Image: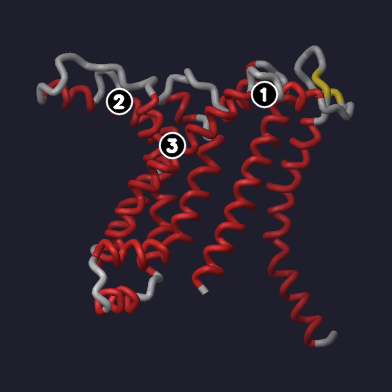
Amino acid sequence: MSRAGNRNLTTFLMLAPSITMAILLLIIPILIILAYSFAERDAYGGAVWNFTFESYRELLQPSYLPIFWNSLKIAFYSTAICILVAYPMAYFLAFRAGRHATLLLALLIIPFWIDFMIRMSAWMVLLGRTGTLNSILTGLGILEAPVRMIGTYPAVMAGMLYAFLPTAVLPIYAALQGMDRKLLEAADDLGAGPIESFWRVTFPLSLPGVMAAVLFVFVPAMGVYAIPVLLGGGKSIIIGNLIVQLFLDFRNMPLGAAVSVTLLVISSVIIVFYMGVLRRVEEART
């Protein structure tokens, strides 16, 4: 075998485990869900293998449109809040933390080694009517009596911020950390103040990290399930709740699969749009 053939065989063997795992754990499950979405529902909630668009036509009913809109709205607000909080944190870690940056990053990530449901349950204790936050506020005299926090929109936003903050901080920090500091020195030499230097040098160069953070938060936030249920009381049905209810409560697997495929399509469109914008940003920088 030639040298090029040996290289190709070696590359294939090295990629084979990853390709196999991607096929088994990603492609095949997606194909199964796609097949279910075109099936019919029988009287007992099962799927009848008869190709039809009935599930997708049902999704066009007015009752489902507010669910998709509410999911997009929650994902948008969650992303905006995460970026507004994450950027100052990433900026501090990149430019002010110095040798303590690694330790602070570790402290940011370590809590997320704990199981997700345990962390969300802790927030229920923290925000409960007899929880820690109400106890502190009433003890300080800020509140006369405990108030309801669980089951409110701010509680959901707090949970979203807690869940997705590290995924927003890390890409922004990576973009800021890889920035050429000589550009800031040049801006200072040319008479730019700190604010002008930030808006004309630092922020434009950090845009790829910001855009990556937007993608890493917005896409999973659209399909998140546990946070709106635990902290929002399940009052607002979003796509994640709808999928769980259709599969487990209503036993309508074709319609649940159609919602899952629709969510996948929306996420794919967002990713494609993100890649296009990122390409334009990179071209503008060169």
Q: Residue at x 62, y 43 (%)?
A: 267
Front position among marks 1 and 3: 3
Relative to the observer, which residue lies in front, 158 or 79?
Answer: 79
Q: Looking at the picture, how far across and down is residue 60, in whole percent?
A: 71, 24
Label 3 near label 1: C-beta < 8 Å?
A: no
Within 10 angstroms of label 1, few (less than 14), some, or many (20 or more) residues? Answer: some
In which image quadrant can residue 230 be found? top left
Say which residue label 1 marks.
247
Q: CA distance from mark 3 to mark 2?
A: 20 Å
Label 2 near label 1: C-beta < 8 Å?
A: no
Name the image quarter holding the N terminus: bottom right
Q: Residue at x 81, y 23 (%)?
A: 54
Sequence-first disc among 1 and 2: 2
Q: CA distance from mark 1 to mark 2?
A: 30 Å
Which numbered dot is residue 77?
3
- 97 sits to left or right of 55: left
**Type of amino acid at the residue the image marks with label 3:** Tyr
Front position among marks 3 and 2: 3
**Type of amino acid at the residue the image marks with label 1:** Phe
Q: Residue at x 52, y 63 (%)?
A: 281
Task: Name the element at disc 3.
Answer: helix
